[in-house]
């Protein structure tokens, strides 16, 4: 029987990073993945959607080219070629991971894996079943789109976020059920490409997990652009009519019908325990997810779990860090995931990014705090880019230590990293304000907001 020091079930951003780090630390590793390396993020999530975001962004810029003194005639786009480029980007990245795995001499088995007892992986392929002994087991089986109990979700034309990425044509109209990250990113992409988009959210606000000021500012911008937004609205049923679909919804004013050629279910994701015999293993679960400690250890000795299967913040970069921690802990290092600053990025238009505390959470806790905001309309680089919507918002304690940040505006997903470092290392707003920022650049907006924690931003009346 083959034996390895580390056996990993799942080759997504948690699993393959764990494998790379474990091999780097000199451990023998076997990785079981039924599909392609990279998991949902690379193949059916983060990377393909961001590739589409770029195409939509470029098309938006072309439509506004005259504002920059540029005249373009006969511009158009070919959606099938947009999707072909998406596939090319994904294939390039998958190939890169495969080369990294090969270079580290990690044994990858492309097969269906199963775990019934600690210390063993069962692998099922066309040639039969094999049992592999592992000293340490890492469960990295990811997540699946969450289903919702609505009549009609099985109808043709009702798709998940994974299925919509395989389409080669655009619908004329799209109703998106769910006003979270997935729903709003697809709303921004498809609206920019000319699709009539409606978003339905049951809660009072879009993006409920971030600072409440951001969705309050984003929602009117989305509506102004032409996207229909329905909050505090429940979906009652989906039905077929005249070759299309009808989504029946209800809000405080009563029932209404929204016609659509297609419906996207964007109601979140749930841990994927397929192949993991949790009860047989004796794994402790919490709300359908595997319970872990700060070292990624489960309730079963030498069994670790990482990524979406442990619930919580389902983000690729969180899974990757968890994979690193699991590998290092197996190798005997003193590491923990607890207390780390976790950024989030939402690729709507404008972009949104956040880290640390939100203002509503600080209010609820009763903690004293300071807040400072700086609009991109007062930033020279943003004005030159023609991207003045949004702001930087910093939160700090009474001593000025940065507790959280929210950014809505150009390149927010990149700008947030300065704030992540501040939250992670306990830096003060003064540290940010006194750091020289290149001019003219977008990060100057962070510097200005930092000045505002104790005094006032320099370039704001």
Image: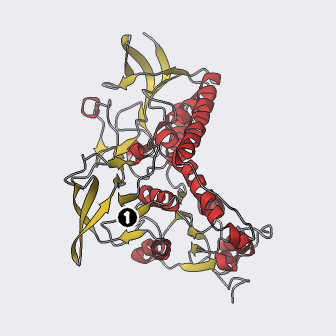
Residue 47 on image: x %, y %:
55, 45
Give the quarter of the figure containing the C terminus.
bottom right
Residue 271 on image: x %, y %:
35, 43
Give the quarter of the figure containing the N terminus.
top left
In the image: residue 300, left or right of residue 452: left
Instruction: Look at the picture and state if 398 lies above or below 89.
Output: below
Instruction: Name the quadrant containing residue 57.
Output: bottom right
In the image: residue 380, left or right of residue 356: right
Residue 165 on image: x %, y %:
45, 45
Q: Residue at x 35, y 53 (%)?
A: 262
Instruction: Look at the picture and state if 78 lies above or below 191.
Output: above
Instruction: Name the quadrant containing residue 371.
Output: bottom right
Q: Residue at x 23, y 77 (%)?
A: 252
Residue 346 on image: x %, y %:
52, 59
Q: Residue at x 34, y 70 (%)?
A: 230
Q: How many marks?
A: 1
Front-lying residue, 301 or 235? 235
Query: Few, some or many C-alpha atoms within 10 Å of disc 1 (few <14, some 14-19, many ≥20)?
Result: many
Can residue 35 be seen here? The reply is yes
Instruction: Look at the picture and state if 380 lies above or below 22.
Output: below
Front-lying residue, 180 or 56? 56
Can residue 335 be seen here? The reply is no
């Amino acid at each position: 029987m083959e034996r390895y020091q580390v056996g990993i079930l799942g080759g997504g951003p948690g699993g393959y990073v764990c494998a790379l780090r474990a091999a780097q630390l000199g451990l023998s590793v076997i990785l079981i993945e039924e599909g392609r390396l990279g998991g949902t993020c690379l193949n059916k999530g983060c990377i393909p959607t961001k590739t589409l975001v770029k195409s939509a962004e470029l098309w938006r810029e072309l439509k506004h080219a005259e504002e920059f003194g540029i005249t373009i005639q006969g511009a158009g786009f070919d959606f099938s070629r947009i999707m072909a480029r998406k596939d090319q980007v994904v294939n390039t990245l998958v190939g890169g991971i495969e080369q990294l795995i090969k270079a580290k001499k990690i044994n990858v088995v492309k097969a269906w894996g199963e775990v019934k007892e600690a210390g063993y992986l069962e692998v099922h392929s066309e040639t039969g079943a094999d049992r592999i002994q592992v000293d340490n087991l890492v469960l990295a089986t990811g997540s699946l789109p969450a289903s919702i109990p609505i009549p009609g979700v099985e109808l043709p034309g009702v798709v998940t976020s994974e299925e919509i990425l395989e389409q080669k044509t655009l619908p004329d109209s799209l109703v998106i059920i769910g006003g979270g990250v997935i729903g709003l990113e697809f709303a921004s992409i498809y609206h920019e490409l000319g699709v009539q988009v409606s978003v339905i959210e049951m809660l009072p606000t879009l993006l409920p997990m971030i600072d409440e000021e951001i969705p309050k500012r984003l929602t009117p911008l989305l509506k102004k652009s032409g996207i229909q937004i329905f909050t505090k609205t429940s979906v009652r049923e989906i039905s077929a009519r005249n070759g299309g679909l009808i989504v029946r919804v209800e809000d405080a004013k009563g029932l209404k019908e929204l016609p659509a050629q297609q419906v996207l279910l964007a109601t979140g994701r749930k841990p994927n325990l397929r192949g993991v015999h949790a009860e047989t293993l004796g794994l402790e679960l919490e709300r359908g997810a595997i319970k872990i400690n700060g070292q990624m250890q489960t309730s079963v000795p030498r069994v670790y779990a990482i990524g979406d299967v442990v619930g919580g913040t389902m983000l690729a970069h969180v899974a990757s860090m968890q994979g690193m921690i699991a590998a290092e802990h197996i190798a005997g290092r003193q590491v923990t995931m607890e207390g780390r600053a976790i950024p989030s990025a939402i690729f709507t238009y404008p972009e949104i990014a956040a880290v640390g505390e939100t203002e509503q959470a600080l209010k609820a806790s009763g903690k004293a705090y300071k807040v400072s905001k700086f609009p991109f309309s007062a930033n020279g680089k943003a004005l030159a880019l023609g991207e003045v919507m949004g702001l930087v918002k910093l939160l700090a304690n009474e001593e000025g230590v940065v507790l959280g940040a929210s950014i809505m505006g150009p390149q927010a997903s990149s700008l947030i990293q300065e704030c992540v470092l501040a939250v992670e290392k306990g830096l003060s707003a003064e540290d940010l304000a006194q750091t020289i920022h290149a001019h003219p650049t977008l990060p100057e907006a962070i510097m200005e907001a930092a000045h505002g924690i104790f005094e006032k931003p320099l370039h704001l009346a």
